Image (cartoon, helix red, strand yellow):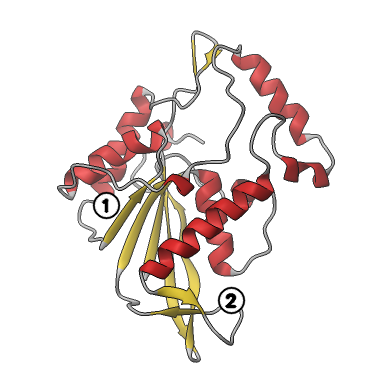
């Protein structure tokens, strides 16, 4: 099974200097989403899955319209690392909280942001959700070889519309890479980009190969955001 991981387009994190929880897309983000849909218009997918967050649902809208899908198939476990609800908090204060968090000792990064979801819990949520879903689609860990997979139908394709952290965690897990609490900094994906993992036959199983990471060829340079 080939797995395509799309990241949502640019969200409106703040309005009039105040933070927004679970925001939709900016006008630029909506254009980015349309460009992503046009890039994927000639692709075919056997399965499509979408994060429940507003920014991913809005990013998925033009993509799903292209495929004639009216209701997005929501997978709750695809939600991004959960932050505290900063609705109405000045965006400068939120930015300062992130700067302070980034300066913590590495071991403390596993705790996530104060009042938010610990990264340990996030990683477990995503990998367990992924394992359950892939198992239903005929993709399971190899019985004897670590980091190899059993893949019933290597020609099938699945599209996930999710987030930088979620997608990076999926990539690291399928590649067998030791997790870190900053996956999105290790596998960088700009808004409205997509990444591709392909199963490659190795011995009696399959290894996932990172065929493409953060492709933004469809987005003009002056519209690329992170």
Residue linked to disc 1? 40
Q: CA distance from mark 1 to mark 2?
A: 29 Å
Q: Quadrant of the N terminus?
A: bottom left
Where is residue 196 drawn, in percent x and y? 42, 61
Q: Secondary structure at mark 1?
A: helix
Relative to 181, is 15 above or below?
A: above
Q: Indicate left or right for 109 with 197 as reference.
A: right
Depth order, front residue of 186/150: 150
User: Mark 2 packing: few (<14 Cα in 10 Å), some, or many (20+)?
Assistant: some
Relative to 71, is 58 above or below?
A: above
Residue linked to disc 2? 147
Q: Is residue 182 visible?
A: no
| Quadrant housing residue 138 | bottom left
Where is residue 89 drawn, in percent x and y? 60, 13
Depth order, front residue of 28/102: 102
The numbered mark at residue 82 is none
User: Mark 1 packing: few (<14 Cα in 10 Å), some, or many (20+)?
Assistant: some
Q: Is residue 111 visible?
A: yes
Q: Indicate left or right for 60 with 215 as reference.
A: left
């Amino acid at each position: 099974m080939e797995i395509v991981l799309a990241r949502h387009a640019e969200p409106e994190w703040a309005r009039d200097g105040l933070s927004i929880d679970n925001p939709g897309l900016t006008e630029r983000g909506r254009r980015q989403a349309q460009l992503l849909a046009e890039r994927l218009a000639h692709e075919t997918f056997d399965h499509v899955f979408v994060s429940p967050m507003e920014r991913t649902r809005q990013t998925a809208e033009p993509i799903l319209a292209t495929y004639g899908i009216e209701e997005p198939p929501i997978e709750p476990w695809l939600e991004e690392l959960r932050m505290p609800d900063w609705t109405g908090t000045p965006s400068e204060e939120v930015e300062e909280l992130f700067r302070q968090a980034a300066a913590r000792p590495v071991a403390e990064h596993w705790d996530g942001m104060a009042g938010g979801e610990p990264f340990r819990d996030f990683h477990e949520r995503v990998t367990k959700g992924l394992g359950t879903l892939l198992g239903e689609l005929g993709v399971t860990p190899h019985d004897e070889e670590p980091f190899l997979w059993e893949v019933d139908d290597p020609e099938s394709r699945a599209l996930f519309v999710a987030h930088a952290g979620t997608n990076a965690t999926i990539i690291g897990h399928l590649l067998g890479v030791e997790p870190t609490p900053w996956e999105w900094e290790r596998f960088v994906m700009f808004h409205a980009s997509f990444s591709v993992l392909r199963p490659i036959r190795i011995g009696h199983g399959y290894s996932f190969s990172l065929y493409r990471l953060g492709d933004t060829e469809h987005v003009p340079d002056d519209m690329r955001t992170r």
